[in-house]
Amino acid sequence: MNSFSNPTMGPVAAGSVGQNMSQTMEQYLGNTMNIQPTLKIRPGYRFDITVTKDMVFPGPYLVKGN
């Protein structure tokens, strides 16, 4: 087989299908990667939260009821 010969229909079609599938999956993964995770917790369930960044409040924290 000569490496400089014209490609046949089989390899051309397979390359085209592969390229189209790659583009489709890239679009699908790009859309789903931007979805933020959602947690659903039943009412009354106790859980802990770990804050990984600084929290800034606009004014002093006042305890009500004193």
Image (spheres, rainbow, N blue to C red):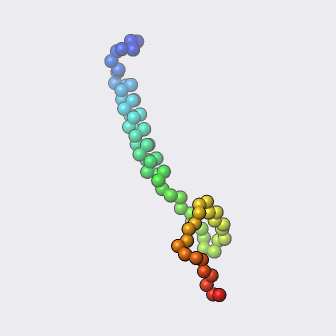
User: Residue 42 location in percent, x, y?
Assistant: 60, 70
Q: Nearer the viewer, residue 35 or 41?
A: 35
How many marks overall? 0
Residue sticking out furthest to the bottom: 66
Location of residue 63 with respect to 41 vertically, above or below? below
Residue in the picture at 61% in, 60% down? 52
User: Residue 25 location in percent, x, y?
Assistant: 44, 43
Q: Quadrant of residue 3?
A: top left
Residue in the picture at 62% in, 82% down? 63
Residue sticking out furthest to the front: 60
Residue sticking out furthest to the top: 2
14 displayed left or right of 58 = left
Q: Quadrant of residue 40?
A: bottom right
Q: Nearer the viewer, residue 1 or 56?
A: 56
Residue in the picture at 42% in, 38% down? 22
User: Residue 13 location in percent, x, y?
Assistant: 36, 29
Q: Nearer the viewer, residue 62 or 27?
A: 62
15 displayed left or right of 56 = left
Q: Quadrant of the C terminus?
A: bottom right
Location of residue 60 with respect to 34 vertically, above or below? below
Q: Quadrant of residue 55?
A: bottom right
User: Residue 1 location in percent, x, y?
Assistant: 40, 12
